[in-house]
């Protein structure tokens, strides 16, 4: 029986060997066929898409590797092959990335993280392991990229941990406990100094501090404590001196100055939004100005004079004035060239004459009105009729303005241009309603009449000059060799030029002046019953327009 069993086993083995050989030969023949190889690759791809099949295959490979690694020779050969592969930097990098990717996937599982931390703690109990780990970290930190990555990883982990309030409390307690040691504080200060030498780190630290302060200042209790601490610290003169120096250095930056001005403006707006604060500020300023009147004036003058040296500030000040004037409807219209008149020329055109006493204040040099203002209506028609009509733009006459013609003293005297006065009156009568309704009548043809008379006079003068030239020519032909207009023996002493013009005999107006009393016999009008008194009194300022109400 035993022989039979043995023979049967041998036959089965022979059949299996034969079958394996036959399958091997079949595989060799099939692998030479391209269609078979393509179909086999597609079937493998389809299998790999299925996660269950991949997992089964992975487990089978791992089990076979574990079984093979029990042999020392296999392990030795595998280690040598890995060493030879690691000599290539590209392979090392690929292997490192593969390991990191596998660790990241595994660390998504909490149980794996717990086991990994427990194993690390257990391993770090060994001094040799700790020493080797520290040396490896030192060698890695020599590379700036690795240091930066490690720093970012630590910061990210700290940010995640600091979201927990208990961790923050424990961290602050540990820092306070550690800072009790003088050596630790000294080392911390030195490390901060070395970091602050870098401008980027200083900027980041400053921004971080400002962000934390902004966050903390949302709490009213923190603001109260901060103000109390600042008041207490400012009692020390050294602290105040350092604070002022820091502000001076910071204000050299234009962006800081703009930010500071905006911040102060918003703070003042918020403070002045309460009427009680506004009244207290007004009373405080009033009392301060009464005490230090001269000092405040001198300070304001010096500050404004220093600011006005900058063109941008003066332009900004002008723009502000224009905006205020437009907002309050207190601006003056643009003056046309026809109304560029002197003071007495303006008085001759105005339909109202305001009599007032203007005196200079003892301080500041400003002008003020003393006493009452007498508003006297005026008839312009007789004054215009009395003025000589001439086309000479530069021609002037002497005019005196009196309250009454019988008075010896005149209130105002000046040389007046009749042409400018009449042109200005024409402009006002054409364009302004206040003057259209005044009833003034002007001869519109005075320009043409004067032009015709001037043409006749010029023609007569031309004829007379031609006759004189003919006579002079005849005389010169007779006595051309011996005549000389200049006596050679005559000696000229001083300047022979003169500014005297030729005054004709038929123009008596050049020698005598005009005296007007336009307000004589008129009854004054109250300013309350005459709303357009200012516009009619000063036509060069208001240009004959009514004020906006």
Image (cartoon, rainbow, N blue to C red):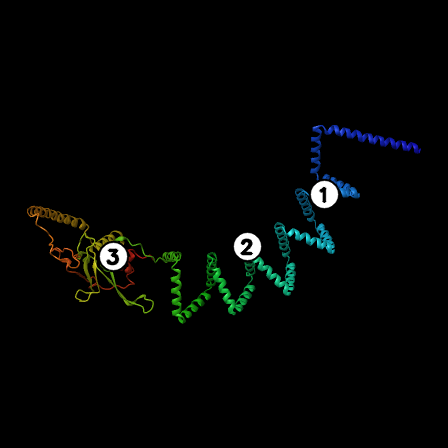
Considering the image in quadrants, where does the N terminus appear? top right
Q: Residue furthest right?
A: 1
Q: In what element is the residue under mark 1?
A: helix
The residue labelled by disc 2 is: 200
Q: In what element is the residue under mark 2?
A: helix
The numbered mark, 3 or 2, whose residue comes first in the sequence reads 2
Q: In the rendered image, is residue 249 in sight?
A: yes
The residue labelled by disc 3 is: 341
State the image coordinates of residue 147 (x, y, percent, origin top left). Answer: 62, 52
How far apart, in angstroms, are the residues tagged by discs 2 and 1?
44 Å
State the image coordinates of residue 406 (x, y, percent, origin top left). Answer: 16, 66
Considering the image in quadrants, where does the C terminus appear? bottom left
The numbered mark, 1 or 3, whose residue comes first in the sequence reads 1
The disc at residue 82 is 1
Horizontal side, residue 55 vs residue 279: left or right: right
Q: Which residue does the image show at 55% across and 66% down from the upper left?
A: 225
- Category of crowding for the residue at label 2, using alpha-carbon neighbours closer than 10 angstroms: few (below 14), some (14–19), many (at least 20): few
How far apart, in angstroms, are the residues tagged by discs 1 and 3?
106 Å
User: How many marks can you see?
Assistant: 3
Q: In what element is the residue under mark 3?
A: loop
Horizontal side, residue 399 vs residue 148: left or right: left
| In the foreground, 507 or 72 | 72
Residue 63: quarter of image: top right
Residue 160: quarter of image: bottom right
| In the foreground, 72 or 157 | 72
The numbered mark, 2 or 1, whose residue comes first in the sequence reads 1
- Category of crowding for the residue at label 3, using alpha-carbon neighbours closer than 10 angstroms: few (below 14), some (14–19), many (at least 20): some
């Amino acid at each position: 029986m035993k022989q039979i069993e043995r023979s049967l086993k041998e036959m089965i083995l022979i059949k299996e060997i034969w079958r394996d050989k036959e399958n091997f030969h079949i595989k060799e023949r099939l692998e030479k066929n391209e269609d078979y190889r393509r179909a086999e690759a597609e079937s493998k791809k389809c299998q790999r898409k299925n996660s269950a099949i991949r997992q089964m295959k992975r487990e089978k490979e791992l089990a076979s590797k574990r079984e093979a690694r029990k042999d020392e020779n296999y392990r030795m050969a595998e280690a040598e092959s890995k060493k030879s592969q690691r000599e290539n930097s590209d392979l090392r990098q690929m292997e490192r990335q593969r390991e990191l990717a596998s660790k990241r996937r595994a660390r998504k599982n909490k149980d794996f993280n717990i086991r990994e931390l427990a194993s690390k703690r257990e391993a770090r109990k060994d001094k040799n392991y700790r020493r080797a780990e520290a040396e490896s970290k030192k060698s890695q930190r020599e590379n700036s990229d690795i240091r930066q990555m490690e720093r970012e990883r630590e910061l990210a982990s700290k940010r995640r941990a600091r979201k927990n309030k208990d961790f923050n409390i424990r961290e602050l307690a540990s820092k306070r406990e550690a800072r009790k040691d003088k050596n630790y504080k000294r080392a911390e200060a030195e490390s901060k100094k070395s970091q602050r030498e870098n401008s980027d780190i200083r900027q980041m630290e400053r921004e971080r501090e400002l962000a934390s302060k902004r966050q903390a200042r949302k709490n009213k209790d923190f603001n109260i404590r901060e103000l109390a601490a600042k008041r207490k610290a400012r009692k020390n003169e050294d602290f105040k001196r350092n604070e002022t120096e820091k502000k001076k250095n910071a204000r050299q930056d234009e962006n800081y100055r703009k930010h500071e001005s905006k911040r102060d403006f918003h703070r003042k707006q918020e403070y002045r939004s309460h009427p009680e604060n506004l009244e207290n500020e007004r009373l405080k300023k009033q009392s301060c100005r009464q005490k230090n009147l001269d000092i405040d004036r001198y300070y304001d003058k010096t500050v404004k004079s220093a600011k006005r040296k900058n063109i941008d500030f003066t332009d900004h000040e002008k723009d502000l004035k224009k905006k205020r004037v437009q907002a309050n409807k207190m601006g003056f219209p643009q003056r046309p060239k026809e109304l560029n008149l002197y003071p007495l020329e303006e008085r001759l055109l105005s339909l109202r004459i305001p009599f007032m006493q203007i005196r200079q204040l003892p301080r500041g040099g400003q002008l003020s009105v003393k006493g009452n203002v007498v508003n006297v209506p005026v008839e312009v028609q007789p004054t215009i009729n009395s003025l000589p009509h001439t086309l000479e733009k530069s021609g002037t006459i002497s005019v005196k303005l009196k309250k009454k013609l019988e008075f010896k003293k005149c209130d105002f005297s000046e040389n007046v241009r009749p042409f400018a006065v009449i042109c200005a009156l024409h402009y006002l009568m054409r364009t302004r309603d206040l003057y259209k309704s005044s009833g003034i009548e002007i001869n519109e043809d005075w320009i043409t009449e004067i032009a015709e008379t001037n043409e006749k006079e010029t023609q007569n003068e031309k004829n007379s000059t031609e006759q004189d030239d003919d006579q002079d020519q005849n005389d010169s032909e007779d006595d051309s060799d011996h005549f000389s207009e200049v006596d050679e023996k005559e000696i000229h002493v001083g300047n022979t030029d003169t500014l005297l013009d030729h005054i004709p005999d038929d123009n008596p107006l050049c020698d005598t002046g005009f005296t007007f009393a336009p307000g004589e016999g008129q009854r004054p009008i109250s300013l309350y019953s005459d709303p357009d008194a200012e516009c009619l009194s000063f036509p060069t300022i208001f240009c004959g327009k009514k004020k906006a109400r």
